[in-house]
């Protein structure tokens, strides 16, 4: 510590009660907490009192921490890669759509155990405004659970049960905005100036117009513009997403400390990982797209330090759907290295998986993933095939140019293909937020529907059905091997198709992301034990992948991954290394047999152990002279 900061720390410490472990963490992370806050708010007259109050809150919160959670604090401090290990496999679900309530989720834990997951992300579960509420992403009270789901005590009990089964719990913290029904917003509406200053509001269009010159719209169809006129206030309010989601103003230190308290409270309920929603948007700057501003990283470092000091068992996961170069910064880059999030969603991999499946070609994925920055020390990706959001085809001109393709045409192809509007398409998805001038769109649809299972079932085409199943497994095989925490999105393990009734709900009709948020079909889930069914094929296939991952150290998030040219553009190849262990993955992206010269296996010092390599796929790997023959959508994992 610098001498002047040491003096400041001594002063802080003298005024704080806390156990020795808390105080030593405070000392260790004091500058990591203080410096970004001073950089952001040092000149703000409100800062001194806010900082002192925050430290008190941290000490109190650490003191109140349950003994079981303190034990987790200790375990995870001595095993800092607890989240990044090859054993971690996650599952994502809306609590209500999965099991009705939080109690219902507790009753369904045997199902998750059977699948082999060790991490459960329950979609937004804090009290939201009444519908429409963007699937819970419009929080009205961070201190309460959505009443239909249960109570904070239920959440605490769920976390305890999960911990007893070796499963950690991930919950969303919506940092960027609150519902306009949140107490802060209501106070602002009632004339409270202090609360009004929690939001970004403007008396007229002058500033909104200046910002909008460079602001992209997130939901141009369902919620155009980034500002909403609020009659009661007589002001424009910044609302990046829907007009009922008001962006918080993080240039106000009180907003930061208020959110830090939310984090502390969730930590003490027993939440293990916080999914930081829409985190790139936290700081705004005129003349920019108001995403990924450097201040966002100061905020994240400070928030992370709050948790590290008061509740070190808690991990952070960033939801930042941004370009590869930006994405990696959420894992802590440069002077923030090791000080931001443990995990970030690898949306680039997700989009490329679907892109490669549609084109049946590996070069674009090989090129883009090969040029992606490596993850910084102590952090890793979250890899996934589908989630509750649309698929954005963020494929750039540079990327396609490098492999002789055209970005616009490829993006158009993908949105057409997955809407089922391209010759030969097997998909049954839909366009989301289509751009009128370019015709490009994002894509909605469940994995099963996008991969051809829905169309095959409707047509009663058994061959097409088998191909659809293989496609879903293939994408998961690459996501599971890529390195990082793989997430299974609820229903994909049994091939849930698009919700046919999604438009019945009056508040969902405008947003077709609801098509891929079906309710769990427990009758279908029972068929997972019935050989010959779609459910059994997917369930067993995913269980094989879970088992393969747990046994393959090279999938540890901290390993290095290198996509490779396999000599066949239809076969994707990836080499991973970690702690002296290697994994070579080969994956056929097409519905035809594909050949790869077997020397690729020797080249990396691996053994051509065909039975072992075929295990996660479940089919024998054929050999024809010098060539490995991959059946349609077959994949193989060769490990040392
Ligand atoms: C995140 C969520 C998305 C939501 C948005 C606004 O991107 O994943 O579903 O609409 O944040 O909260």
Image (spheres, grey):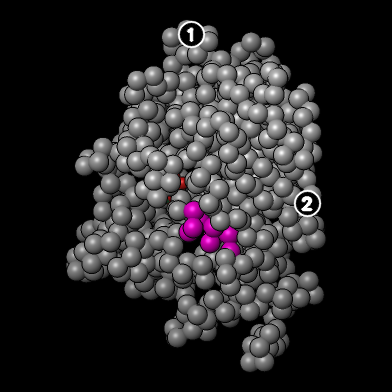
Q: Is residue 327 rendered magenta in the image? A: yes
Image coordinates of residue 104 in percent, x first then y, are: 62, 33
Alpha carbon distance from label 1 to label 2: 46 Å
The response on whether ligand 1 sits within 8 Å of label 2 is no
Please say whether residue 579 is visible from this viewpoint. yes
Q: Is the magenta stretch mostly helix, strand or loop?
A: helix
In the rendering, which numbered label is found on residue 50? none
Snapshot quadrant of residue 43: bottom left
Task: Say whether residue 41 is magenta.
Answer: no
| Secondary-structure class at tag 2 | loop
Front residue of this view, candidates 527 and 506: 527
In depth, the one of 538 and 521 nearer the eye is 538
User: Measuring 42% from the left and 23% from the top, which residue is drawn there?
Assistant: 427
* Residue range (magenta): 324-332
**Residue at image x 40%, y 40%?**
404
State how many labels appear. Answer: 2
Q: Mark 1 points at which residue?
A: 461
* Residue 132 appears in the rendering: no
Q: Label for residue 579? A: 2
Q: Residue 542's spot in the image, x, y percent? A: 66, 28
Q: Quadrant of the C terminus?
A: top right
Image position of 124 (left or right of 311): left
SS at circle 1: loop
Disc 1 crowd, CA 10 A, few/some/many (<14, 14-19, 20+) = few
481 to the left or right of 580: left
Q: Which residue is drawn at the image coordinates 67% and 51% (left, top)? A: 560
Quarter of the figure that contains the N terminus? bottom right
């Amino acid at each position: 510590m610098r001498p002047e900061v040491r003096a400041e720390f001594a002063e802080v410490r003298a005024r704080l009660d806390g156990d020795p472990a808390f105080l030593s963490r405070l000392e260790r992370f004091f500058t990591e907490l203080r410096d970004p806050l001073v950089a952001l708010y040092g000149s703000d007259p409100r800062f001194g009192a806010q900082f002192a109050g925050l430290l008190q809150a941290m000490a109190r919160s650490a003191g109140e921490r349950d003994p079981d959670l303190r034990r987790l604090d200790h375990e995870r401090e001595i095993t800092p890669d607890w989240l990044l290990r090859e054993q971690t496999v996650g599952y994502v679900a809306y609590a209500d759509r999965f099991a009705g309530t939080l109690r219902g989720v507790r009753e369904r834990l045997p199902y998750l155990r059977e699948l082999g997951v060790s991490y459960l992300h329950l979609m937004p579960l804090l009290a939201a405004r009444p519908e429409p509420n963007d699937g819970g992403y419009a929080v009205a009270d961070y201190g309460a659970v959505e009443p239909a789901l249960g109570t904070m005590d239920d959440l605490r009990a769920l976390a305890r049960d999960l911990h007893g089964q070796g499963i950690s719990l991930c919950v969303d913290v919506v940092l960027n905005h609150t519902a306009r029904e949140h107490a802060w917003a209501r106070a602002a509406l009632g004339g409270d100036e202090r609360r009004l200053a929690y939001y970004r509001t403007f008396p007229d269009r002058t500033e909104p117009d200046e910002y909008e010159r460079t602001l992209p719209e997130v939901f141009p169809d369902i919620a155009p513009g980034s500002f909403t006129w609020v009659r009661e206030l007589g002001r424009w309010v910044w609302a990046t997403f829907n007009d009922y989601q008001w962006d918080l103003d993080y240039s106000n230190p009180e907003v930061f400390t208020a959110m830090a308290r939310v984090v502390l409270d969730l930590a003490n309920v027993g939440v293990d990982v916080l999914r930081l929603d829409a985190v790139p948007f936290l700081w705004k700057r005129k003349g920019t797209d108001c995403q990924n501003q450097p201040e966002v990283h100061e905020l994240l470092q400070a928030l992370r330090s709050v948790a590290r000091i008061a509740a070190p068992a808690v991990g952070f996961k960033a939801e930042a759907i941004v370009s590869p170069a930006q994405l990696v910064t959420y894992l802590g880059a440069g002077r923030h290295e090791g000080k931001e999030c443990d995990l970030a969603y690898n949306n680039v991999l997700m989009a490329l998986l679907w892109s490669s499946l549609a084109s049946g070609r590996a070069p674009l994925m090989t090129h883009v993933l090969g040029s992606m920055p490596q993850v910084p020390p102590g952090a890793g990706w979250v890899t996934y095939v589908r989630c509750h959001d649309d698929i954005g085809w963020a494929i750039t001109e540079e990327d396609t140019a490098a492999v002789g393709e055209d970005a616009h045409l490829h993006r158009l192809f993908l949105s057409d293909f997955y809407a089922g509007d391209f010759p030969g398409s097997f998909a049954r998805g839909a366009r989301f937020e289509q751009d009128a001038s370019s015709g490009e769109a994002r894509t909605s649809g469940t994995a099963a529907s996008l991969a051809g299972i829905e169309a095959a079932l409707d047509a009663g085409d058994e061959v097409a059905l088998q191909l659809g199943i293989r496609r879903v497994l293939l994408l998961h095989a690459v996501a599971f091997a890529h390195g990082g925490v793989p997430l299974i999105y609820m229903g994909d393990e049994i091939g849930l198709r698009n919700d046919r009734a999604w438009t019945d709900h009056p508040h969902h009709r405008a947003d077709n992301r609801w098509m891929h948020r079906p309710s769990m079909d427990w009758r279908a889930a029972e068929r997972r034990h019935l050989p010959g069914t779609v459910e059994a094929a997917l369930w067993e296939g995913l269980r094989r992948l879970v088992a393969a991952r747990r046994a393959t150290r090279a999938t540890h998030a901290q390993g290095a991954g290198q996509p490779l040219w396999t000599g066949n553009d239809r076969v994707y190849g990836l080499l991973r290394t970690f702690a002296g262990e290697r994994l070579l993955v080969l994956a056929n992206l097409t519905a035809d047999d594909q050949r790869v010269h077997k020397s690729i296996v020797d080249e990396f010092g691996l053994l051509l152990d065909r039975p072992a390599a075929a295990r996660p796929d479940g089919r024998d790997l054929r050999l024809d002279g010098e060539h490995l023959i991959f059946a349609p959508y077959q994949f193989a994992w060769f490990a040392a």
